[in-house]
Amino acid sequence: MPADVINGTQPNLNEAQIKLIDELVYEKTGQSLNDLQRLVLSECWQTSKKTYEEIATENNYSSRYIQQRVAPSLWHLMSEIAETKVTKSNCRSTLLRCIEHTTERLTETADSHDAIIYKTLEQHKFPFELPAESVPLGSPYYIQRKPYEFQCYKLIRQPGALIRIKAPRQMGKTSLMNRIINHAQDYKTAVVNFQQTDQEILSDLDRLLRWLCANIARQLKLPPMLDDFWDEDIGSKMSCTLYLEEYILEQIDEPIILALEESSELFDYDAVSKDIFTMLRTWHEYTKHNETWENLRLILVQSTENYIPLNVNQSPFNVGFEVPLSPFTREQVSTLAERSSIEIAPQTSHQLMDLLAGHPYLIRLALHHIAKGSVDWEGLFALASTDAGIFKEHLHRHLWNLQQHAKLCVFFRDVLSQPAPIRIPQEHAFKLHSMGLVTLDGNQVQMSCGLYRQYFTEHL
């Protein structure tokens, strides 16, 4: 960040400063500055400050509205992030100190992270670890998801937090979730993965909620005690809610992180999923006004968009903080290559991105084999979509899954046959997206990477 941004030698509030202030507001309060608040802050930042009446007149607002509604709300938010009283008269000097402190903190954090990375690299016997479903804590090959990661670390410490991590499979959701949990390792934690649920349980609301409660209790080292709280006269949802409130939250008087992985697995069971997601939204609402529920922090991990109809006031997917994980950028791929002592020529980098489109798991797998010397770049590209290539197991798994779902396979062939995005039924579009085979482009979908296009053109 340029020195004049940090030190405030420029007289006006610039974009970098307002962006950082907005991020700090979001981290602290979960809110964002609106356009009018930005305007008032910019005008009051200048050495020659305008009156509220002048600001209102020049921008066609009521001076009373600016003075009594907008300004008090703005200075309250600024006081929150600066942790001291901020007013119109001291906003520039106080917030500049806040910006400088934040910049130093982020720099120290980044430097510390890099130091850990390179120290770990020196200790590694092998140049690159074998990619797995998630990147281990402390791994030098983990790529931070900025700015979301620092925001999640801040948010998980706030009462009633709800974080939603959304991305196709093998994009890094579990890796990020584990780091959020590790950041708050002084909290109690229960991680429930719906992929581990038997199909007959998933289709039965009562059994599923009992399964959920038993999992939570055992991970928190508590006896399940389900029958003491389950009452068929009030129903499964209320029994589950009372169990969490009167047993779990009352028994453990400290913050509890409840992480629900692969919540998208419930989407195929309309009646069950509606009840569960409505219940989760209710739990989140309880955290806003009930001291017992304030200790609950929710993390929802999903592989795709929600395709079940939910009332906007009953859905947990339009509240909280959403973290949409994207494929790696070319710069992030270069960072990974550098950490594994691999030099990538610009042309090779372009080929790799065309083939894999930044898919985190596939990128890590490619770099792992290059670093080991088990394949060179020419061989990797030549054999990528064949049964002799390094991606064969990954591709075979996708092929098998498609072959088990005939209708899904038909729509996937339609996408495969077109070079441009096309429209297919929403449910199938979301399922293909959750597998990582397609990307969403508004209401249309297209192949997510060259590797899949090459392979499935030959095998479907």
Image (spheres, rainbow, N blue to C red):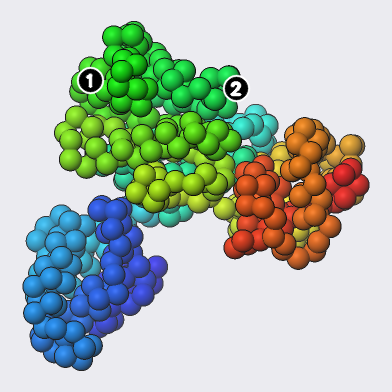
For this view, does 433 lie left or right of residue 43?
A: right
Where does residue 106 sit, x and y in percent of width and height?
A: 36, 54
Dot 1: element: helix
Q: Which residue is mark 1?
A: 246
Type of amino acid at the residue the image marks with label 1: Glu
Q: Is residue 369 visible?
A: no
Q: Residue 448: name its quadrant.
A: bottom right
Give the image location of residue 252, x and y in percent.
24, 20
Q: Amino acid at mark 2?
A: Gln
| Nearer mark to the viewer, of 1 and 2 | 2
Please tell me in which quadrant of the rendered image residue 136 appears.
top right
Q: Residue at x 21, y 57 (%)?
A: 81
Residue at (33%, 60%) from the top-left corner? 23
Residue 48 placement (x, y as % from top left): 14, 87
The residue sitting at 33% across, 77% down in the picture is 14
Circle 1 crowding by C-alpha within 10 Å: few under 14, some 14–19, many from 20: few
